[in-house]
């Protein structure tokens, strides 16, 4: 909810903690409670084919976990913001444990331009494919980065062959030698300096629970199916399908060029 409200909030009057938190609360007040049909939950199981002993164990294999536990280790929800700017735009929130990688990122996918002149690109093997969507990705951790995926004319050619490229700002490459504090270091520094920007105000917390609390009770009441997924999987196929139904488009360039081996189109989902 913190990341969602920061992404969706309007421009605050200033950079002070109170003004920023005021705008975050305004956004949260525009979000109706989450619907059960927009929720997918899962629980990881051991990958018996893995050579890694840790990956062979599932959540229920943990000594401190009851064998009949229905606690989710993966969740995806789709919610909407009922205001002038965001009405009708789906916000997909996803989190999970024991996945193939540990990261936190914001991914904004831009819709296709109506009536575009360039509806195809020429792939590296010479075949025509649909253009990838432009995306703005903000990597929070690890390896903080901001990169924009866009379609450009392939240089050095007379024809208008379009290909995807990236405008990449990776912090540890651009700002070499600069110490980037981790999340807890920032919070402790905020405590010492009296900054409240990164702390939740009581009305903000109340609005967040208003959105989430009803669906938690409904999940327990209606016994929402828990979908199993293997330790180290990219995610849950049903979750990706749900995102596609909301208009999100995956491609083999969904991840950065240096991470293509983990593309969801080339990985087993369960």
Image: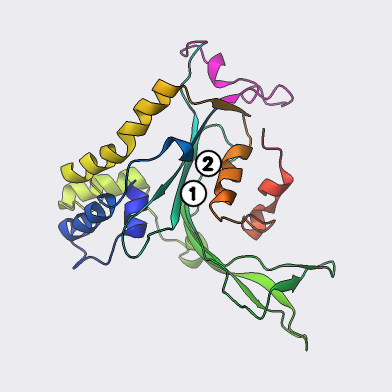
Q: Residue 268 at what x, y percent from top left?
A: 71, 38
Q: Is residue 28 above or below residue 33?
A: below
Q: Is residue 249 above or below residue 71?
A: below
Q: Residue 261 at what x, y percent from top left?
A: 70, 49
Instruction: Compare residues 104 and 227 and report the one nearer the observer.
Output: 227
**Which image quarter holds the C terminus?**
top right
Instruction: Compare residues 231 and 170 and report the one nearer the observer.
Output: 231
Residue 185 left/right relative to 65? left
Residue at image x 47%, y 40%? 38
Q: Which residue is mark 1?
A: 142
Residue 48 falls inside the magenta stretch: yes
Q: Residue 18 at what x, y percent from top left?
A: 15, 56
Residue sitting at the far bottom: 158
Task: Give the distance between the C-alpha atoms of the residues marked 2 and 1, in whole angstroms.
Answer: 8 Å
Residue 102 left/right relative to 6? right
Q: Residue 98 at what x, y percent from top left?
A: 56, 32
Helix, strand or loop at mark 2: loop
- CB-based contact (under 8 Å), mark 2 and mark 1: yes
Residue at image x 65%, y 53%? 259
Q: Is residue 216 above or below residue 147?
A: above
Helix, strand or loop at mark 1: loop
Number of marks in the rendered image: 2
Label annotation for residue 190: none
Whether residue 201 appears in this view of the structure is no
Query: Looking at the image, is mark 2 or mark 1 earlier in the sequence?
Result: 2
Range of residues picked out in magenta: 43-67
Label annotation for residue 102: 2
Q: Is residue 176 above or below residue 103?
A: below
For label 2, count other residues whose C-alpha is less than 10 Å away and answer few (under 14), some (14-19) or many (20+).
few
Residue 49 falls inside the magenta stretch: yes
């Amino acid at each position: 909810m913190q990341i969602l409200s920061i992404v969706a909030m309007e421009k605050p009057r200033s950079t002070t903690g109170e003004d920023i938190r005021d705008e975050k609360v305004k956004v949260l007040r525009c979000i109706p409670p989450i619907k059960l049909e927009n929720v997918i939950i899962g629980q990881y199981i051991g990958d018996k084919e893995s050579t890694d002993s840790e990956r062979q164990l599932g959540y229920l294999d943990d000594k401190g976990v009851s064998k009949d536990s229905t606690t989710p280790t993966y969740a995806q929800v789709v919610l909407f913001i009922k205001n002038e700017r965001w009405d009708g735009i789906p916000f997909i929130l996803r989190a999970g444990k024991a996945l193939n990688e540990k990261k936190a990122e914001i991914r904004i996918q831009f819709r296709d331009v109506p009536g575009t002149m360039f509806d195809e690109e020429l792939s590296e093997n010479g075949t025509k494919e649909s253009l990838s969507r432009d995306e703005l990705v903000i990597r929070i951790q690890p390896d903080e980065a901001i990169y924009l995926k866009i379609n450009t004319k392939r240089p050095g050619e007379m024809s208008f062959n379009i290909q995807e490229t990236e405008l990449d700002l990776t912090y540890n490459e651009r700002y070499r030698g600069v110490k980037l504090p981790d999340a807890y270091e920032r919070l402790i520094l905020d405590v010492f300096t009296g900054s409240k920007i990164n702390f939740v105000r009581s009305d903000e917390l109340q609005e967040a629970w208003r959105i989430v609390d009803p669906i938690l009770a409904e999940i327990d009441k209606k016994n929402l199916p828990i979908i199993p997924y293997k330790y180290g999987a990219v995610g849950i196929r049903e979750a990706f399908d749900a995102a596609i139904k909301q208009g999100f488009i995956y491609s083999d360039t969904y991840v950065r060029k240096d991470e293509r081996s983990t593309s969801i189109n080339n990985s087993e989902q369960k």
